[in-house]
Amino acid sequence: MSRTRFSGRTALVTGAGSGLGRAVALALAAEGANVVVAGRTPGPLAQTVALIGAAGGTALAHPADVSRAEDVHALVAAAVDRFGSLDVAVNNAGVFRGGAPVADLSAEDWHTLLDINVTGVLHALQAEIARMRGQESGGTIVNISSNIGPHRTLPGVTAYGAAKAAVSALTRGAALGHIADGVRINAVSPGAAATPMSLRPGETEAEREIRMKDESPLGRVAATAEVAAAVLYLASDDAAAVVGADLVIDGGAAA
């Protein structure tokens, strides 16, 4: 049975050109949302819009670099100009840098992680909340964090973990600070999912499948649709009493 939890609502998804962001955008559109897809590269965004359109949904592509505050404010303005409101935002844009212990971490990698994964989320929150708290209907925001950092530590990814721990802290603080404004904010922390980010250098998907049988209590990576389902739950009225939560979707890796 089809669901229509987001009919008549406008949803914004950053990092929607591929992977989890695309899966979330498709899932929101399938449940009736008008979806604005954002990312730094126009081509993949156009592909996401085409997929949504082919499935009977409505979407708008708007390139944006979340590390630039002006880009994010323009993105929110474009969503409102096209569809009249901003009801749901999913802050998924992020990058992964790993493989080196702290002492060998390059300054470039450190600043990239902070600029996109932390400051980018801050920029998005500020622009989205500014719009949502002025709406009678308020809005909901879901930040994509990670099980690495807030919930577990792995060798070689300390900087990435620090950035994602900051996302979780931002989520809790923003949730507490803005629920009275009618803006409900939560996070999802995925573990390894079926995206290129979970592949080791040179690893194939088949090799990852074998590796995950040993590394994950569940014995596999999460499907992007499974993570998207958690995002949609938090963004929907089904989670109306959920504020400042961090939902871990990692097959038990951080349990």
Image (cartoon, rainbow, N blue to C red):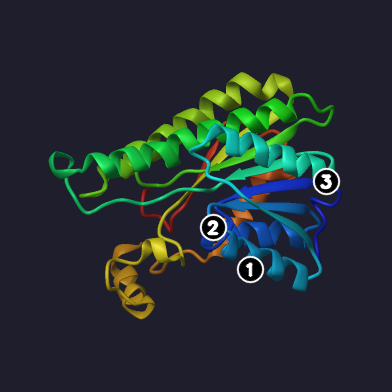
Q: What is the number of the mark on residue 83? A: 3
Question: In this figure, which residue is indicated by the disc labeled 2?
Answer: 41
Compared across the picture, whether 44 is left or right of 30 comes to left
- Taking the spot 54% from the left edge, 58% from the top edge, the residue there is 41
Q: Nearer the viewer, mark 1 or mark 2?
A: 2
Question: In this figure, which residue is indicated by the disc labeled 1?
Answer: 47
Image quadrant occupied by the N terminus? bottom right
* Mark 3 Cα-neighbour bin, 10 Å: few <14, some 14–19, many ≥20: some
Q: Secondary structure at mark 2?
A: loop
Q: Residue furthest bottom?
A: 206
Q: Position of residue 214 (x, y in %)?
A: 29, 68
Query: As displayed, is residue 182 above or below residue 32?
Result: above
Q: Residue furthest left?
A: 103
Q: Nearer the viewer, mark 3 or mark 2?
A: 2
Q: Secondary structure at mark 3?
A: helix
Mark 1 and mark 2 lie on one chain; the one further toward the N terminus is 2
Mark 3 and mark 2 lie on one chain; the one further toward the N terminus is 2
Q: Amino acid at mark 1?
A: Gln
34 and 144: which one is in front? 34
- Taking the spot 28% from the left edge, 45% from the top edge, the residue there is 109
Q: What is the number of the mark on residue 249? A: none
* Mark 2 Cα-neighbour bin, 10 Å: few <14, some 14–19, many ≥20: some
The answer to whether marks 1 and 2 mark residues whose Cβ atoms lie closer than 8 Å is no
Q: In this figure, what is the number of numbered marks? A: 3
- Taking the spot 65% from the left edge, 64% from the top edge, the residue there is 46
Alpha carbon of mark 3 to alpha carbon of mark 1: how far?
20 Å
Q: Amino acid at mark 3?
A: Phe
Q: Secondary structure at mark 1?
A: helix
Mark 3 and mark 1 lie on one chain; the one further toward the N terminus is 1
Alpha carbon of mark 1 to alpha carbon of mark 2: how far?
11 Å
Quadrant of the image occupied by residue 217:
bottom left
233 and 30: which one is in front? 30
